[in-house]
Amino acid sequence: MLDQYLPVLMQLSVATGFAVSTLLISVLLGKSAKSNAIKDSAYECGMLPIGDDKPRFSVKFYVIAMLFVIFDIEVVFMYPWAVTFKNFLANGQAAMVFWSMSGFVGILLVAYLYALKKGALSWKS
Amino acid sequence: MSLLFYIFSGLMLGFGIMVIVCRNPLSSALCLVISFLGLAALFVTLNAYFISIIQILVYTGAVMVLFLFIIMLLDIREEKSKDWNFLAVGGGVVVLFGFVVQLISVLGGYEDGKQKMVPFPEDSSHEDVKMIGAEIFTNYNFHLQVLGVLLLVATIGVVVLSRRQGKEGSENN
């Protein structure tokens, strides 16, 4: 059972290996500079910086994230659908299962069109 | 198999502790992501593939993205290190102790709860995703469509709520 997961392990090791080797090479090849508190402070035309260094994020990010959660749940149902469809095809139940999923996706298509029409997905305004 | 259990549960608990130890809320959230991934791997070792995929897709994918956006939106800063409040720590230890005693006494009441280690399922032929799919798209067709309507209502709610905020903002200007 375990040897089925060998590709997953390989992919994981390639991903971590790439990240670690990139960081390591940049440390080894790059010139290291000495840093101190004054050098690291923000320089703004010689004035003392006022206020926050980090920008506030727009609330539009939150709307996009909420819509992403909703359509993510749609994908959760597509996963067993994709896995079982071949079995249903063999049993001759394919039409019912197809229309079942079509109805579900159709309802969510209405939701998508609503969000699109109301401009929830447009970045301007 | 039991070695994998110890690796993944150790990973999970270690990063779970990191979630509360980290001062920066963004690194706490990312530690929680790794903790969730360890949990998903534990589900795979129990042959619960569907829950594992949902764990990765919904929790680590969607919910944690939402958490990160909320942290950015609310502009939560790095915490300053605090002094130890011994009363709070003592209270926490008492609550934890009570919880563990309760858990052991409840689990000890069952025959399955008395074994030291949960036995790992032997055959992987038991395919939970296929079983779930076979149920959802035949017996629970209507419920699936109702769920679609529920998600539609949620979408409308998100759009309406975010719209109203925009209007109030323009009135204030």
Image (cartoon, coloured by chain):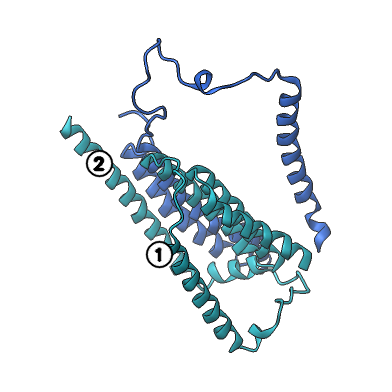
Chain colours: A blue, B cyan
Q: Is residue B70 left or right of residue A101?
A: left
Residue under label 1, please give it. Answer: B146
Residue B22 in percent (x, y) is at 53, 47
Which three-letter amino acid code belongs to the residue tagged 2? Gln
Residue under label 2, please give it. Answer: B165
Q: Residue at x 36, y 54 (%)?
A: B154
Q: Is residue A96 left or right of residue B143?
A: right
Q: Point out which mark residue A15 bears.
A: none
Rendered position, A76 above or below A36: below
Q: A9 or B20: nearer the eye?
A: B20
Q: A88 or B65: nearer the eye?
A: B65
Residue A25 in percent (x, y) is at 75, 26
The N terminus of chain A - image quarter: bottom right
Q: Is residue B46 left or right of residue A72?
A: right
Q: Residue at x 64, y 83 (%)?
A: B113
Residue B93 in percent (x, y) is at 50, 69
Going from N to C along the chain, the mark reached first, 1 or 2, is: 1
Which three-letter amino acid code belongs to the residue tagged 1? Val
Rendered position, B80 above or below A81: above
Chain at tag 1: B
Q: CA distance from mark 1 to mark 2?
A: 29 Å
Image quadrant where residue A60 sits = top left
Crowd around label 2: few <14 · some 14–19 · many ≥20 (10 Å):
few
Residue A35 in percent (x, y) is at 59, 21
Q: Residue at x 77, y 44 (%)?
A: A13
Q: Residue at x 50, y 62 (%)?
A: A100
The C terminus of chain A - image quarter: top left
